[in-house]
Image (cartoon, rainbow, N blue to C red):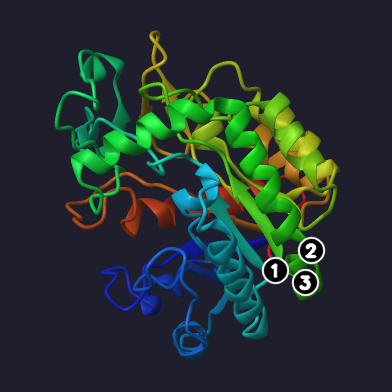
Amino acid sequence: MKSSFRWYGDSDPVTLDKIRQIPGMRSIVSAVYDVKPGEVWPEESIKHLVDECREHGLIFDVVESIPVTEEIKLGRPGRDRHIENYCESIRRCAKHGIKCVTYNFMPVFDWTRTQLDKEAEDGSTSLVMYWEQMKGLDPLKDDIHLPGWDSSYTQDEVRELIRAYGEIGEEGLWENIEYFLKRVIPVAEECGVVMALHPDDPPYPIFGLPRVITCEENLDRYLSIVDSPANSLCLCTGSLGSSPKNDIPAMVRKYSAMKRIGFMHIRNVKILPDTSFEESGHLTQNGSLDMNAIVKALVETGFDGYFRPDHGRMIWGETGKPGYGLYDRALGTAYINGLIEANGGVIE
């Protein structure tokens, strides 16, 4: 398995010289952040990231993410141009050594939380999603700014997008997914790139938006649209795991055995009685997921792809991008490394 770490580029307070000191660290997960979604990534920007990582003894070979635009997701007239630009970005990434591209098909909002700094009894803070805090909110009537929502959208634009997704519904979204995959996956195959789909976070409807990457049945449907190793999953244990209906160790074992996991986001989550959830420390005892069973499933099915610790708490007085501090993610990496070794796995 290949250990990796999310890095947000030169402006990230968690620097490459710190990341390289994490035991077993190999790969950097990053993206070109200054290009408008739907446009082609400049080669010089990709090369800059590759060179920066190489100078620090690391490899930039996982992209997270090349955004799928609302035009593509909604099947609007501009989608063909955006898809061709998407394919060209994949070609350019492959030219510079990228092996895995992560992306998602979440309508409007990549992820939703109600609080980014919920303090736990030990003084750490983390991201949470409480249904109680969602009650009474209506984005079609109220001005709402929830964590994870794209701040570039005006409230009127958010309302228009929600209405548009309401019109196409789940089946319309599935049709647009199929249109996208049948054009993008052949390009990824030609380039030797694995496309890794991130599940919806959380994996259930928010404000009536169709969210379909939520469960085993729908993951099966997605993978069957183009039956290719290049059409793979970024299996996020915390995203899928925030629904008690999902048996995460069983899903990991199934899709890893099928060789349809390109990237693992490994983190724990504590599910509350009303299905609200809190992002917790990585230890099994801190959340609702059996972390050892997850790693054991990967080892026993011969998973040789990428993994990263995903979100962490803010601990030891650290400040920065919520979920993406250094300390707790480094602890998470060390914990995962230990589980891999204890189960007989190998970290490249």
Looking at the image, residue 221 sits to the left or right of residue 245; the answer is right
Position of 31 relative to 234 (above/below)? below
Query: Looking at the rendered structure, which numbered label has been put on residue 348?
Result: 1
| Sequence order check, earlier mark of 2 and 3 | 2
Image location of residue 24, percent across then percent down: 58, 67
Residue 332 makes an appearance in the image: yes
Quadrant location of the C terminus in the rendered image: bottom right
Position of 18 relative to 108 (above/below)? below
Q: Which residue is mark 3?
A: 192
Q: Which callout, 2 or 3, points to the residue nearer the camera?
A: 2
* Residue drawn 21% across the image and 32% down it: 118
Image location of residue 187, percent across then percent down: 74, 68
Query: Looking at the rendered structure, which numbered label has been put on residue 186?
Result: 2
Disc 1 residue type? Answer: Glu
Residue contact between numbered discs 1 and 2, judged by CB atoms under 8 Å: no
Q: Secondary structure at mark 2?
A: helix
Image location of residue 123, percent across then percent down: 19, 36
Looking at the image, residue 250 sits to the left or right of residue 17; the answer is right
Q: Residues within 10 Å of mark 1 (few under 14, many from 20)?
A: few
Q: How many marks?
A: 3
Disc 2 residue type? Answer: Pro
Looking at the image, residue 145 sits to the left or right of residue 85; the answer is left
For the residues labelled 1 and 2, the Cα–Cα distance comes to: 29 Å
| Sequence order check, earlier mark of 1 and 2 | 2
Disc 3 residue type? Answer: Gly
Using the rendered view, name the quadrant where residue 99 is placed. bottom right
Q: Secondary structure at mark 1?
A: loop
* Residue drawn 37% across the image and 47% down it: 312
* Residue drawn 58% across the image and 35% down it: 173
| Sequence order check, earlier mark of 3 and 1 | 3
Quadrant location of the N terminus in the rendered image: bottom right
Residue 61 makes an appearance in the image: no
